[in-house]
Image (cartoon, rainbow, N blue to C red):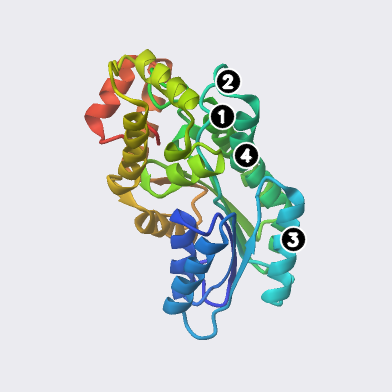
Amino acid sequence: MRNFENRIAVITGGGTGMGREIARQLAAEGCHIAICDLSEEEMARTRALCEAESPDATRVATCVADVSDEAQLQAFRDVVCRELETDCVHLVFNNAGIGGADSLINDDRETWERTFDICWKGVYLGTRTFLPMLLASDEGHLVNTSSVNGFWASLGPQTPHTSYSAAKFAVKGFTEALVNDFRLNAPHVKVSVVMPGHIGTSIALNSSNILGRSPKDLTDEQVEEVRQRIEQAGIPLGDVTADQIRVGLQQRIDQFQEQAPMTAAQAATVILDGVREERWRILVGADAEVLDRMVRDAPEEAYETSFMERLLGETNWVLGN
C-alpha cells in the first residue's frame, strides 16, 4: 500500500504523540482518519491539525474510548462505520499505550494490571475488533506498536520494568505470529510490529495522569515511596523535601519529551515508510537499532551493569523510556 489517498485508517491513542502525527501525515495524503483516545480535548486538537493539512474531501472521526475495554472499542468501531460510511478499513494502528507500574513486588496490582491491559489488551482487542473490517478491504495493513522493551525488558539494572515490558513482549510475539497467519489465511492483509526507542512524546505525562501519579498530586506517602526507590538506586537525596521531589519528577517528565533524540513526527514518518515497504519489523530511532544489535550480540549480558554502560556509551538513551 504505497498510496494512502482515499484509504481509511484507524488509530488508537490518536490524541497525542505518534498517534497524532500518524493521523496528521496520513490526512495530508488524503487518507480518511478515525482516532480514539481518552482525552476528547487532545483528539479535537488532532482533528484540527488533520483538517488543516488535508484535502477538503478528507474526513476525520473521533471517539473517546479506553482500549482495554472491548465494549468501548466496539463503540469506536460503530462510530467508524457510521461517520465514515464504510464497512471496511485499510489501516489499523494499535498505537495506544502507557508506561508505569514497574515492579511486580512493590507496585500495587491494580496499577500493574492497568498498565498491562492498556499496552497488551489494547492491541489484542483492537485487532479483534477491527480485523473483520480489514479482511473486508481490498488490501489492508495492521500495525501494532511494541517497543524496544519488547526485546529488552529493562531500563537498566537499577530499575524494574515488568508490566510495560511484559506487555510489549506480548505485542511483539503476537504480531510476529500473525505474519504467517495472515500470509496463509488473508494474504491481502499485511502486518507490522513497531519498536520505537526514545521518542519525544507525552507518554510519561499521560501515563502519570491515567495512573493517578501526576507529580503535583502525589501524597507525602507516595513521595516517600519515590524517595526510597531513588535511594535504593544509589542516589542519596539527603534533606531534599517532598515538594522538591515533586518538582524533580515533573522536570524529568518534561525532559523526556523535550530532550528526545527523535520527534513524534519523525517517528511517524519512519512508521509510514515501513508500511509502504511492507516491512513486518519497524525499528524507530538510532537508539532502537543500537539496542537491537547489542541484545542480539550479547543476550546473556543484557541485564548487567556492563551492558548498560556500553549502551550509554553508544546512545543518548534516557532512563524512563
Q: Gap in Å between the C-alphas at discs 3 and 4?
A: 19 Å
Q: Quadrant of the C terminus?
A: top left
Where is mark 3, residue-wise?
75
Q: Residues within 10 Å of mark 2 (few under 14, many from 20)?
A: some
- Of mark 4 and mark 1, the one earlier in the sequence is 4
Q: Looking at the picture, tell me which residue is in the foreground, 215 or 299.
A: 215
Determine whether, in the image, residue 70 is placed left or right of residue 54: right
Can you see residue 77?
yes
Q: Nearer the viewer, residue 88 or 48?
A: 48
Gap between marks 2 and 3, in whole Å? 33 Å
Q: Looking at the image, is mark 3 or mark 4 earlier in the sequence?
A: 3
Callout 3, which amino acid? Ala
Q: Amino acid at mark 1?
A: Ser
Discs 4/2, front: 2
Residue 120: give its label: 4
Tell me the kind of residue under disc 2: Leu
Most distant residue in the bottom direction: 56
Label 4 CA crowd tier, 10 Å (few <14, some 14–19, many 20+): many
Question: Within 10 angstroms of label 3, few (less than 14), some, or many (20 or more) residues?
Answer: some
Measuring from the top left, give residue 80's x and y in whole percent: 68, 68
Q: Nearer the viewer, residue 140 or 14?
A: 14
Q: How far apart in space, not on screen, are marks 4 and 2 (Cα)? A: 16 Å
- Estimate the x, y position of residue 320 in percent, counting from the top left: 39, 33
